[in-house]
Amino acid sequence: MTEEENLTQEPVRAAPDLGKFKNVEALMHAYQELEAEFTRRSQRLKALEAAAEQPAQEPGTPEGQPQAPGEADSDALLRAVRGNEEVRGRIVGEYLASLAGVPLLAGSGAAVAAPAERVTTLKQAGAMALGYLKHRKNGG
């Protein structure tokens, strides 16, 4: 071959290294799927950034779902009650009063007990014993 023929002939190209892909079409398909996923994630990130710039939404309200008119009133009322210690105390007191006859438990789970009654005389001991026996006889 002459030098002129060497210049006009195209060099022999080695097959490109496609890694785990069998051919160029498989590589192109994987790239398109990756590009679509990247676009979806970018859109999601943009939506989250926009939501972060908005005023804080009330807890318990799913993002993007409008509240029903009654729910908005309930939420406003709940916020008002949480901010007023006197109203909260009255609500809790009324609730506890409605539980008459239900044994209450302290925070540790132990039952709330009345202070022990101490007798100082034999007469008080007899009266306490009679009261206990009468109470047991009546099914208490």
Image (tube, rainbow, N blue to C red):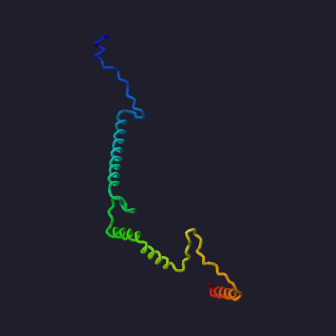
In terms of image quadrants, where is residue 125? bottom right
Q: Residue furthest right?
A: 122
Q: Is residue 65 left or right of residue 96?
A: left
Side of 115 where 24 appears, left or right: left
Q: Where is 138 relative to 42, above or below?
A: below
Query: The N terminus is located in which quarter?
Result: top left
Residue lying furthest front: 120
The answer to which image quadrant residue 110 occupies is bottom right
Residue 30: give x, y in percent of width and height. 37, 39
User: What residue is rendered at 37% in x and 28% in y?
Assistant: 16
Q: Residue at x 30, y 10 (%)?
A: 2
49 sits to left or right of 93: left
Residue at 28%, 17% in the rendered image: 8
Front-most of residues 79 and 62: 79
Q: Is residue 94 above or below residue 16?
A: below
Q: Quadrant of residue 77?
A: bottom left
Q: Quadrant of the C terminus?
A: bottom right
Residue 18 position within the rendered picture, expressed as x and y whole percent measured from the top left: 39, 32
Q: Is residue 24 left or right of residue 92?
A: left
